[in-house]
């Protein structure tokens, strides 16, 4: 197995194993291919008011929950499965308890919607449990899919930016943003694209491209860096360079004097560098980076919105600040403070919605889960996790319905998985 922490299961249930893997594959495919904007384009009322309750949950969540249920059934004893999970991956159970407690709290005291917890937290839990129990060959094939998808997403984002079309319209709070030049590609909102593209690019730098030839990794990295300009994420782009440049310098320092480059690889790297140089010059001449650079000069009210969200907390009565507020109260305060598209920090949004006490307790369970993700992954996953939290801190992200954590868990568990034991190499 790819993970030495895997739970022992009966060997006479290969049919259930294959069925669980089929649901896992379908869940990952739906997660990557069906963004919130794509679901809206297909006619599902995923984020809007009203509509059927089943439409409020992402298809990937249904598939992942079914896949995990089959995996538990395959274990032969659900209680033994839970017992092993507590012993070997306690962070998973800690977050599960946290999500359950938050669900009860919202249902009984806040009287707000709870479906957002399914996609935001239950989906990543299910994917984590299943992915960390797959074989190394399976994960290698999954890695190739991830690399291919991210390349397609970047190419589509660049095409949207250069040609001017968009595969899905950008919608925020039910309003189509027709004046937004940023690409939506396959991952949905430009900020989601920017965040996940930056995280994936960092993983390539941190060893997440080990299933690809080295020249292909450098080409993939260049493609993702170019795509960041099309998605327009200032924070994500800045954090990528902040984390990636030191990692590259450290790698060069560690392996100085030990590089063995074949003539073919050297020729390929030189050709890639020439192509990158020519492409860069052409894009600069075409004004490709102009609008992206203007994002750093004109924040279009983001700084004011972040300042206003602190004023929003000041307006809350002490009991609401500590123990949560009615959703209508928060919506009213957002309108009064001029924050139409959500509180631009999931920390502040959590406190505003659920109160400081519940938020602090839940954050502890979330950190336990992320610690578990780091523990079963390569050491570089710690930096990816920190980068993910910093990016999420600049938007409502985890305080709303989002698949960002699920995608991040999938990328980390597949690309930054620990190397298999030597015995698995033969």
Image (spheres, helix red, strand yellow):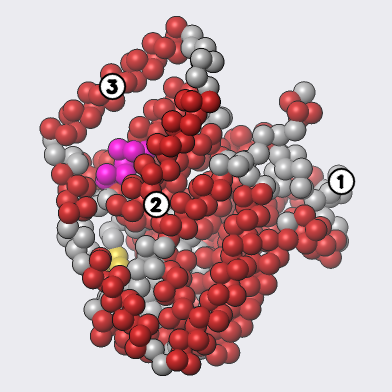
What residue lies at 46% left-to-right and 36% top-to-bottom? 247
Mark 2 element type: helix
What residue lies at 38% left-to-right and 79% top-to-bottom? 49
Q: Are marks 3 and 2 in contact (CB under 8 Å)?
A: no
Mark 3 element type: helix
What residue lies at 76% left-to-right and 51% top-to-bottom? 16
In-image side of 90 versus 295 (left or right): right
Q: Earlier in the sequence, mark 2 or mark 1?
A: 1
Q: Main secondary structure of the magenta part?
A: helix
What residue lies at 45% left-to-right and 6% top-to-bottom? 263
Q: How many marks?
A: 3
Residue lying at the far top in this picture: please name it: 263
Q: Position of residue 139 (x, y in %)?
A: 63, 39
Q: Earlier in the sequence, mark 3 or mark 2?
A: 2
| Picture disc at residue 332 | none
Q: Which residue is mark 2?
A: 195
Q: Are marks 1 and 3 in contact (CB under 8 Å)?
A: no
Mark 1 element type: loop
Q: Is residue 258 visible?
A: yes
In-image side of 15 versus 118 (left or right): right
| Picture disc at residue 275 | 3
Task: From this view, report whether residue 108 is shown above or below residue 397.
Answer: below
Q: Position of residue 224 (x, y in %)?
A: 36, 38
In this view, the residue in front, 215 or 94, is 94
Instruction: Read off the magenta span.
Output: 224-230
Q: Is residue 164 visible?
A: no
In this view, the residue in front, 256 or 171, is 256
Q: Which residue is mark 1?
A: 12
In this view, the mark in front (1 or 3): 3
- Taking the magenta stretch, the answer to whether it contains residue 213 is no
Q: Position of residue 298 (x, y in %)?
A: 17, 58
């Amino acid at each position: 197995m790819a993970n030495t922490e895997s739970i022992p299961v009966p060997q006479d249930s290969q049919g259930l194993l294959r069925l669980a893997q089929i649901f896992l594959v379908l869940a990952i495919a739906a997660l990557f291919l069906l963004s919130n904007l794509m679901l809206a384009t297909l006619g599902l009322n995923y984020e809007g008011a009203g509509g059927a309750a089943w439409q409020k949950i992402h298809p990937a969540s249904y598939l992942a929950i079914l896949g995990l249920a089959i995996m538990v059934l395959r274990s032969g004893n659900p209680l033994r499965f839970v017992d092993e999970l507590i012993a070997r991956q306690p962070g998973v159970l800690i977050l599960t308890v946290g999500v359950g407690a938050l669900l009860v709290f919202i249902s009984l005291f806040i009287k707000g919607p709870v479906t957002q917890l399914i996609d935001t937290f239950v989906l990543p839990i299910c994917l984590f449990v299943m992915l960390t129990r797959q074989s190394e060959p399976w994960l290698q094939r999954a890695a190739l899919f991830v690399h291919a998808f991210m390349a397609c997403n970047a190419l589509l984002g660049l095409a949207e930016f250069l040609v001017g079309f968009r595969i899905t319209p950008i919608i925020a709070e039910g309003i189509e943003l027709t004046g937004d030049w940023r690409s939506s590609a396959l991952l949905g909102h430009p900020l989601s694209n920017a965040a996940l593209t930056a995280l994936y690019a960092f993983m390539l730098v941190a060893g997440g491209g080990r299933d690809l030839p080295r020249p292909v990794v450098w080409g993939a990295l260049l493609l993702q860096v170019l795509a960041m300009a099309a998605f327009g994420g200032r924070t994500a782009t800045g954090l990528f360079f902040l984390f990636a440049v030191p990692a590259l310098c450290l790698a060069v320092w560690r392996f100085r004097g030990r590089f063995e480059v074949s003539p073919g690889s050297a020729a390929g790297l030189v050709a890639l560098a020439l192509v990158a140089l020519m492409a860069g010059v052409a894009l600069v001449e075409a004004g490709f980076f102009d609008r992206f650079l203007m994002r750093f000069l004109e924040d279009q009210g983001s700084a004011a919105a972040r300042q206003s969200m602190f004023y929003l907390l000041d307006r809350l009565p002490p009991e609401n600040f500590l123990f949560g507020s009615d959703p209508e109260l928060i919506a009213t305060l957002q309108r009064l403070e001029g924050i139409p598209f959500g509180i631009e920090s999931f920390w502040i949004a959590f406190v505003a919605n659920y109160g400081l006490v519940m938020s602090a307790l839940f954050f502890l369970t979330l950190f336990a889960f992320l610690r578990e993700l780091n523990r079963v992954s390569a050491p570089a996953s710690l930096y990816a996790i920190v980068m993910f939290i910093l990016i999420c801190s600049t938007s409502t992200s985890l305080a709303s319905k989002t698949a960002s954590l699920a995608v991040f868990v999938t990328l980390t568990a597949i690309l930054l998985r620990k190397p298999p034991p030597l015995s698995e190499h033969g």
